[in-house]
Amino acid sequence: MLLAQGSACAAAAWWARLSPKAYTANVAGALLVAPEGTSLDHRNFAAPKIGLPFPSIVVGADDEAQRLGVEWGSRLIDGPLLNAATAPTNRLRAIIERFTSAVVERDVIAAYRIIQAIGDA
């Protein structure tokens, strides 16, 4: 699972764009919080306009975060979650817990299907 916040979201998107498929295939999903992309203040961190090769969630209240989420093919969760002076809020923790639970559940279902396909040996 890939977690990123702020300009690290653009770095993660570039990594996904430029890395071999064998690397990105190992990412079960990404949680991208308050991404910064192409605004005047963050133009040095411009994000690629591509769909990410793994499931992702973008969390952010501003138009830029919403736009990046659409460009990356991410599920969007609207709302500010972080205060620069404090640790992540309970809401962000709940999102991370739900997201990781969904990843684990998906992997369990995939493993069960493989076992069914193989059958009893």
Image (tube, rainbow, N blue to C red):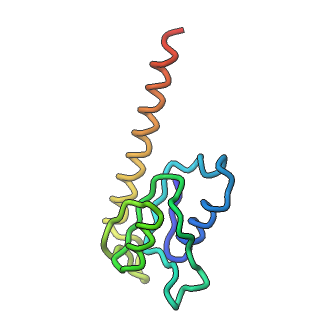
Horizontal and vertical percent position of residue 77: 33, 66
Q: Quadrant of residue 104?
A: top left
Residue 9 placement (x, y as % from top left) = 53, 70
Considering only vertical position in the picture, is 26 above or below 60?
Answer: above
For the point 49% across and 13% down, the residue is 119
Q: Residue at x 54, y 85 (%)?
A: 42
Which part of the image, by quadrant, shows the C terminus? top right
In the picture, measured across the screen, residue 84 lies left or right of residue 80, that is right
In the image, farthest residue toward the bottom: 40
Tell me if 90 is positioned left or right of 70 in this view: left
Quarter of the rendering containing residue 61: bottom left
100 or 86: nearer the viewer = 100
Residue at 35% from the left image edge and 59% from the top image edge: 95
Rendered position, 13 above or below 45: above
Image coordinates of residue 93 in percent, x first then y, are 37, 62
Q: Nearer the viewer, residue 98 or 18?
A: 18
Residue shown at the point (35%, 52%) measured from the top left? 98
In the image, residue 45 lies at what x, y percent? Answer: 59, 80
Q: Residue furthest top?
A: 121
Residue 65's place in the image compared with 74, above or below, is below
Q: How many marks?
A: 0
